[in-house]
Image: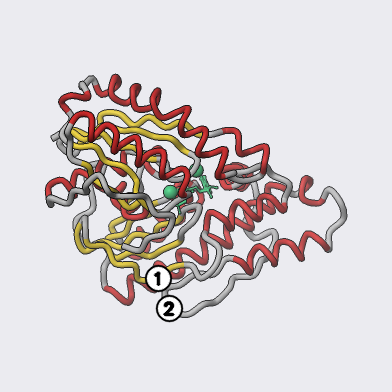
Amino acid sequence: LSILAIESSCDETSAAVCVDGKILSNIIATQAIHAEYGGVVPELASRAHIQNIVPVVDTAIKKANISLANVNAIAFTQAPGLLGSLLVGTQFAKSIALALAKPLIAVHHMQAHVLANLIIEPAPQFPFLCLTVSGGHTQIVLAHSPLNLEVLGETIDDAAGEAFDKTAKLLGLPYPGGPLVDKYAQSGNPHAFKFAQSQVPELNFSFSGLKTSVLYFLQKQPPNFAAAHMNDLCASIQYTIITMLLHKLQLAVKQTGVKRLCIAGGVSANKGLRHAFETLGKEKGWETFIPPFEYCTDNAAMIAITAYYKYRANQFSDLSISPSARASW
Ligand code: ATP
Ligand code: MG
Ligand code: FE
């Protein structure tokens, strides 16, 4: 069973081939153009997807050493994301499906982030809990089965990735700041500065207070303070975000009794989070799973693995399907 999958929800154009649940290729073209603007510019993202999609799909097929004619289904990210970006992948997938008379599989991007944990052996058994931390979402998900995922809690304002990117911007770092905060934090003291940790009920999160806390703190400092204390500032901000995330994850374990835990999404590439998650897991006796880096940030391999389960469950779409910027599961 071979599937070609396309991901184009934000600023990564990606294509992957999955055969019998194994990923044979996962090509990712990251759009560098947005750095100049300090964030993703939707119109530029759509244009870059149009430029990238043919070579990216072509490379994915060649690298997997298959032919398009032998693919069993075409999968694509249908929601959520930037509408113009989603449209490029959707139209491209539909065109191939129509031209080659192949079935079409629509995939939910956030479901795919969670299922990225099923790509590598040993995969977690069900049920498991997943902390999904990305550029637009922060969720605690209870996965009952591959296609039955339940959101137990989520952010009421900024996502964890936004907390990284927005505070990084305050420090004078370019977009996306998350990976840079990660880098500087490695040589910093996480207890050098103390920032606000918002308290919200149940398994929900709030990160907008952290941004304000960092802003007010920096306003009271002399010029060049951020540049002079970059490592300690990054380590302290990162520590605050990780502490808030892992606090709620522990609460989720208490509530559900589920001790099999995964992380997913772009922020799960963060070295500090990966380490703190594993350390906490050892201490608490959890079984922990972390996807390899290339399956954390946006990628088509996670779309392909999700489509693999949808194919086996006979969940296909017809050519009338359209993308959606927002969508619940
Ligand atoms: P969503 O999945 O919610 O639609 P998205 O697809 O834009 O949003 P991802 O590509 O999954 O999000 O993740 C991107 C986010 O991950 C950005 O905010 C980026 O800064 C953050 N990120 C990536 N690597 C790291 C890292 N090493 N440390 C912290 N944050 C990181
Ligand atoms: Mg991105
Ligand atoms: Fe994403």
| Above or below, 216 relative to 75 | below
Residue 130 percent across, percent down from the top left? 34, 59
Residue extending farthest bottom: 201
Q: CA distance from mark 1 to mark 2?
A: 7 Å
Q: Residue at x 75, y 49 (%)?
A: 229
Residue under pointer 1:
153
* Crowding at mark 2 (Cα within 10 Å: few <14, some 14-19, many 20+): few
Q: SS at mark 1? A: strand
Residue 38 percent across, percent down from the top left? 66, 44
148 or 293: nearer the eye? 148
Q: SS at mark 2? A: loop
Q: Residue at x 21, y 64 (%)?
A: 144
Mark 1 vs 2, N-terminal side: 1
The amino acid at mark 1 is: Gly
Please tell me the numbered disc located at residue 202.
Answer: 2
* Crowding at mark 1 (Cα within 10 Å: few <14, some 14-19, many 20+): many
Give residue 327's quadrant in the image: bottom left
Residue 44 percent across, percent down from the top left? 57, 38
